[in-house]
Image (spheres, helix red, strand yellow):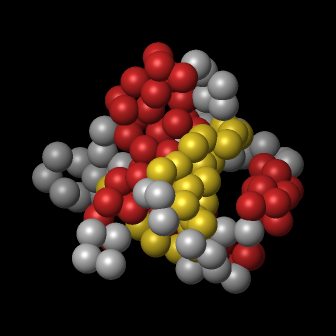
Amino acid sequence: MRLMAFDYGRRRLGIAIGDEITGTARGLTTLRPDHADAGKTIAALVAEWRPAAFVVGWPTRADGEPTALGPAIRRFAEELGRCHGLPVYWADERLSSHLGRERVRHRGSDPGLDAHAAAVILEGWFMENTRNA
């Protein structure tokens, strides 16, 4: 099963694609979430890659409570699922930006830190959700 992941931030939205069979993911692109064409770009990526579901990174503080960005991420994820008619799963995104920086260091900056962070989020989701499969 192919899934598409999102690392949502106020200034940047990282997008990655991954395969459940291999448990690996790769960054596709980084967008500005407030850009007028962001929805069209996401729709084009969904049409091209045909994911079975979406995984959205969910930020929490050290105490496990959601961050201030939580409501905006929830609205984004709900609209994403509704617009494309696909299920949305949540994934812990703690350390995703740090690990994304490591990918940038080893693989280069293209398609951007946030896309690499989305790939880290998706690979973490694969590890958590396919252990007993």
| Residue 74 visible from this viewpoint | yes
Q: How many marks?
A: 0
Question: Which image quarter is the C terminus in?
Answer: bottom left
Residue drawn 56% across the image and 72% down it = 1
Residue drawn 43% across the image and 44% down it = 120
Residue 69 placement, left or right of 40: left
Residue 16 placement, left or right of 64: right
Q: Position of residue 117 (x, y in %)?
A: 47, 39
Q: Quadrant of residue 14?
A: top right
- As rendered, which of 39 and 5 lies closer to the eye? 5
Q: Quadrant of residue 11?
A: top right
Q: Quadrant of residue 115?
A: top right
Residue 70 placement, left or right of 15: left
| Residue 8 visible from this viewpoint | no
- As rendered, which of 31 and 102 lies closer to the eye? 102
Q: Position of residue 106 (x, y in %)?
A: 47, 19
- As rendered, which of 112 and 13 lies closer to the eye? 112
Residue 3 placement, left or right of 91: right
Residue 100 lies, with reference to residue 7, above or below; the image says above
Residue 85 lies, with reference to residue 4, above or below; the image says below
Q: Position of residue 40 (x, y in %)?
A: 85, 56
> Which residue occupies the extreme left position in the image?
63
Residue drawn 56% across the image and 80% down it = 87
Q: Position of residue 64 (x, y in %)?
A: 19, 57
Residue drawn 23% across the image and 58% down it = 65
